[in-house]
Amino acid sequence: MDLSSFLTSLGTSFLIFVVLMFLFAWLSRKPGNAVVYYPNRISRDSWEGGSRTRNPFAWIKEALYSTEQEVISMSGVDTAVYFVFLSTVLGILVFSSIVLLPILLPVAATEEVTKLTNITVSNGTYSDLDKLSMGHLKEMSSRLWAFLFGVYWVSFVTYFFLWKACKHASHLRATALMSPQAKPEQFAVLVRDIPNAPEGQTIGEQVDSYFKTLYPDTFYRSLVVTDNKEVNKIWEELEGCKKKLARAEAVYALSKKTGNSEGTKPTNKTGFLGLCGEKVDSIEYYTEKINELTTKLEAEQEITLKDKQQNAALVFFTSRVTAAAAAQTLHAQLADTWTVTDAPEPRQLLWRNLKIKFFQRQVRQYVVYIIVALTVLFFMLPIAFISAFTTLDNLKKLLPFLNPILKQEAIRTVLEAYLPQIVLILFLAFLPKFLLFLSKAEGIPSQSHAVRATSGKYFYFIIFNVFLGVTVGGTLFSTLKTIKKDPNSLVDLLATSLPANSTYFLTFVALKFFVGYGLELSRLVPLIIFHIKRKYFCKSEDEVKAAWLPRGLGYGTRVPGDMLMITIVLCYSVIAPLILPFGVLYFGLGWLVLRNQALKVYIPSYESYGRMWPHIQVRLIASLILYQVTMFGYFGVKKFYYAPFLLPLPVVSLLFSFICSKKFFHFFQHTALEVAAHELKEIPNMEQVYRAFIPPSLSSKKLDDDLFEDAAPDGMVGPISGESHDLLP
Amino acid sequence: MDLSSFLTSLGTSFLIFVVLMFLFAWLSRKPGNAVVYYPNRISRDSWEGGSRTRNPFAWIKEALYSTEQEVISMSGVDTAVYFVFLSTVLGILVFSSIVLLPILLPVAATEEVTKLTNITVSNGTYSDLDKLSMGHLKEMSSRLWAFLFGVYWVSFVTYFFLWKACKHASHLRATALMSPQAKPEQFAVLVRDIPNAPEGQTIGEQVDSYFKTLYPDTFYRSLVVTDNKEVNKIWEELEGCKKKLARAEAVYALSKKTGNSEGTKPTNKTGFLGLCGEKVDSIEYYTEKINELTTKLEAEQEITLKDKQQNAALVFFTSRVTAAAAAQTLHAQLADTWTVTDAPEPRQLLWRNLKIKFFQRQVRQYVVYIIVALTVLFFMLPIAFISAFTTLDNLKKLLPFLNPILKQEAIRTVLEAYLPQIVLILFLAFLPKFLLFLSKAEGIPSQSHAVRATSGKYFYFIIFNVFLGVTVGGTLFSTLKTIKKDPNSLVDLLATSLPANSTYFLTFVALKFFVGYGLELSRLVPLIIFHIKRKYFCKSEDEVKAAWLPRGLGYGTRVPGDMLMITIVLCYSVIAPLILPFGVLYFGLGWLVLRNQALKVYIPSYESYGRMWPHIQVRLIASLILYQVTMFGYFGVKKFYYAPFLLPLPVVSLLFSFICSKKFFHFFQHTALEVAAHELKEIPNMEQVYRAFIPPSLSSKKLDDDLFEDAAPDGMVGPISGESHDLLP
């Protein structure tokens, strides 16, 4: 790729971004779109309908001046930790740029090269861009010392910022956990692998007596996990009917306004998918059906609570400290029974996974690991195949009917700039769902944990396949023989293939940040979907709300993407320092756009109090080590005798990671008692805490009343009489 | 080595054992020796002076009929767990023998061999013994199937017995921990890495306020660790003077009886080592000195308690459950501060290690690991050197002056049988002390943990150097070129060198069990030392008691020795099944002799409630895997095409180990709450619990009174007023 096509790529990317930004400024001022651009605020009733009179860049100012506290209150600790990650990376790149750009670019550019080796030229044509890279230096040049210093500088800047970030994230987590507002999950623990109850005892009674013995003063009550499949089915049907009734009523009300004053009663067919069968009055039909289902639900609820108890339970304590301590201690002599862990938030509990037994979880985990490993390895082939295919020359040969189009210079340049990248991005869009499914199949009890697990798997996939696949894949086939002879040459191979792909990744970064963040900011896709839905499908208020209500930031898949970016930028930071400003732009823009989205758009669907951080940091250090090893290899390729001076760096990285994990990470896994012991604003209402965990399909007015009839009246006086703890009237 | 020298070795070993056994029967009947043969019972006042009239084999009956409960009550859970290990190994070997001997020996012996390969012959001469081994089989013989089955049989017998043993050991630990007699350490936790106290607060106050916040109901008080170097020195001097005074008084009393009625007052010189300086009356001199030192000690105690507080403490709770839970939970946000672990017994606390900080412990650990690795690797050279030297022919050449002695047939045969083994055993005697020193240098807080760590190191040493060193070392030099060409040939090398050394190890086992256990039973060395001490050095009662009081079973070094034995026996179990009866004899005799010693002799110096078990089991499985891999190699050497059928075995072993560790081992690290929650016989006297942990040099009548003056009168009413918790009056 030569300079002009690179500049074209950059220019069009930037153009797209500017267009999207103005589109955002224009669209977001329309009141009808407010639910798309300010759903977070609207759902919290904190939206004053502002921003109509302000200039198109007001959101930038707002994002810049927003405090971390605002982010936490609008979008939770997880999001705040994600911003810690973004600003850490930004810090690393800015500080690296400040030193590397003024030093390395002149050093590289002023080198007088008499004969060029093939390695330094990307895709066979030589461009001005390559002049500014390390590839331009002669072998054994003493100027390489400057680049060696650069590697050290980047590494130590990374350590410094990571250390600060680690402390910061830990502080954020601690602050949230010691908040005087009590969260229900802080008073509960999740108990799994409950052994079979002795004869004549229900599981509930067993759990109660077990924990009452161990925690006589702080045990409140327990909630045995039940098999909710049936009851959920009925409940969903009931909810569906309720929605349809609401819809029918809305339609009826509308017809009164628009048509005759009596209105037309909506009808529907009772058969398959509402397409055949008897035609009935919808309102009457659904009202009747709701009554019927409600009775059925109540019966099923009783059966579920009584006969479908499973070997897991949530246990509630009246003290945060006890709950935090209980979640960390071995309860039973056999470690595969009575395993106690901290309870996730009620909304993110994966109920179906709770019953899975200890060793089954282990087996599932390893099976999933194997599947993921196979996926990571075998996706390599298609990616290499596709990236070999999607050069323009190949396209011309294989699809000759495209020739007339490809001959036009403009289209040609754009295609040349973007084609491989688009394939890559499309390719990656499919994977996360599959990985999330696999993670859930491991038997993980909470959504946030499953997302973390997905994120980890996705990271490995992305590093192996996209980064290594593209860099090594390109040169792999030509050098396969070398590898067979000497397996140690893999590092060399990686090192030599990096520079050849530098402009490829430069454009990849540019495309990703301008187009990606442009789309993110303008929310074009959700906007269009929302308007279509509102126009054609939504009738009732609830349906409209469901159409605009966004999910969380989705940082489970976002982080691996950012990781790929930081890996690319780190690996090229010294080889082609010109990538650094693009990295800064990517993360700076990302910070800005996502800050806006976090404050105004996304509504997180769970909160794990920053548990993501160790994941992020470990993978960042893995990237750093990959970078250091690659650089060692690349200095070797340049026949620089002092390359072994780089060897201490990976060791230092491991040491740094070791210290951080020993010092900080334990707290991300468990709640420290000194944090849990902070005073509460008020004594929590334990009844509310308990009810928060009852799944919606099991909670009903009638049952609740029964449930609590013999609980202590104020719901707080510690253990209550032992007769009726199994959720039964 | 031919058959006759093997039989000579066996015969002399057995003769020595019989002689030692009769010596034991005769010596143990003499009343004057009772303190050597029954110290355990005497120190517990449960000795009725029996055994004088019984037959010389009465001890065997006693040992056989003793129950596990007796062992626990006389010698503790650790010893009982050691017996679980011994009987497990015995079970494995007996069940292996029952099946392998009748099958494999005929299969091997009836093979008709036309041409012998060199490999099958030990030391170049062919003997009848080798006929009974797998080496006697032809290559590719279909009879190898029987041996392959043998490997499977031994493996599954091992799994079966280990699983049972694991459950048993866990049960023993649980029973001991849930005992209604409360142990002081069950109410305490060890707190290390206490951060610097804020201005105007002592460490003691800080600890108290920290734990009182977290455990308002169950916190009792704390004991801050102090720098006791000075106070220990004075205290030891004081104790020395007290002993000397007692001795002087005993001498004076004796002289009254034997000499004139007034007696001669003993005198001593005050100068260096009592050899020079002024001559003074001992009784007066020491009385005066004791008074002087007592004053000094009290002053130093006050200074120590006030100014020499260190960053560690023992914290006491009024509940076993709280203490057990606290020892497992993260207390501080930063995991390298306020690290809480369970408190070891007072008698086995390594006070000097307590102050070592978190990361320093990590560094020390890795430094020690490196030193141990170097030791393991570099001891290989001398061992190989020595075992090459100590053949008789070499001795003759190198030390020609020995020729006349070596020419006598009897001496020749004995020497040939024993020389290499004696060198090996002597060589190993030196190491444990050094490894214990290294383990303590890691910063481990308790003696039992240090012993476990030593045991682990010693195991690696012994397996690498003795087993691999002798087997591989012998053939290493001749095949060094093969290894250089193909590193994978190491397994083959191990496999081919095993049979050549089978008779070497047969004699090693024989020597070790007959002579070793004979000496163990007869206690000749302690007996002689005791009599010498009593006759020439001990004057006072205390001194005599100190002379006979034995230590514990010393199973820290005993276990690796047994491990070597089981590794040898396992590895040869199929190759030369004749080793199995010797293994059975070794462990059977060991069980018997040590049962006697545990019941009558040894007094354990600490109790860790069977924490040793996971160590033992993991290493046993490591031996098993070594065996399985070696067998795979050996079948390969025999060109048996179905050797890969053995490959599932190491995987099964790893799986088995994984399941055991997940299911059982957690409980060996921590106390399960359900175990700690068992009811106590009576509410413990917390004052006694607390005092049990005060080191002797710091406890004195006067100080104790002061210490407890503002403690709650009954010592049990939970937290006490906060003013005087730092051990200060």
Image (cartoon, coloured by chain):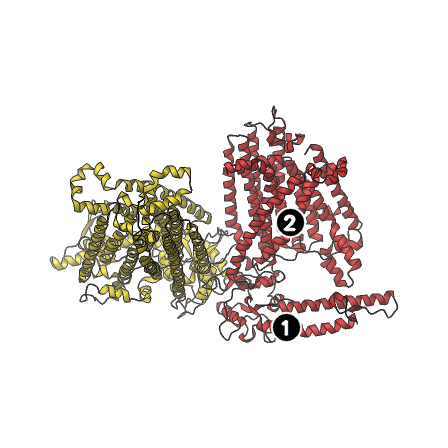
Chain colours: A yellow, B red
Q: In what element is the residue under mark 1?
A: helix
Q: How many numbered circles are shown?
A: 2
Q: Quadrant of residue B563?
A: top right
Label 1 to label 2: alpha-carbon separation:
41 Å
Q: Choose between B30 and A681: the one closer to the eye.
A: B30
Three-letter amino acid code at the position of disc 2: Arg
In front: A287, or B594?
B594
For residue A145, side relative to residue B22 (left or right): left
Q: Residues within 10 Å of mark 1 (few under 14, many from 20)?
A: some
Q: Position of residue A190 (x, y in %)?
A: 43, 57
Determine the residue located farthest toward the left in the rendered image. A260
> Within the image, what quadrant is residue B436 found in?
bottom right
* Quadrant the C terminus of chain B occupies: bottom right
Give the farthest residue toward the top: B114
Q: Which mark is residue B300?
A: 1
Task: Assign the N terminus of chain B to one quadrant of the image.
Answer: top right
Residue A315 makes an appearance in the image? no
Q: Callout 1: residue from which chain?
A: B
Question: Relative to B650, is B613 above or below?
Answer: below
Quick check: A685 above or below A143? Answer: below
SS type, badge 2: helix
Q: Position of residue A240 (x, y in %)?
A: 27, 53
- Side of A227 relative to A266 (left or right): right
Rendering coords of residue B460 (x, y %): 58, 47
Q: Earlier in the sequence, mark 1 or mark 2?
A: 1
Which label was assigned to residue A96?
A: none
Check residue B558 in the rendering and tell me which mark sits there, or answer none. 2
**Numbered disc in front, either 1 or 2:** 1
- Residue B293 appears at what percent x and percent y? 69, 72
Amino acid at circle 1: Glu
Q: Chain of mark 2?
A: B
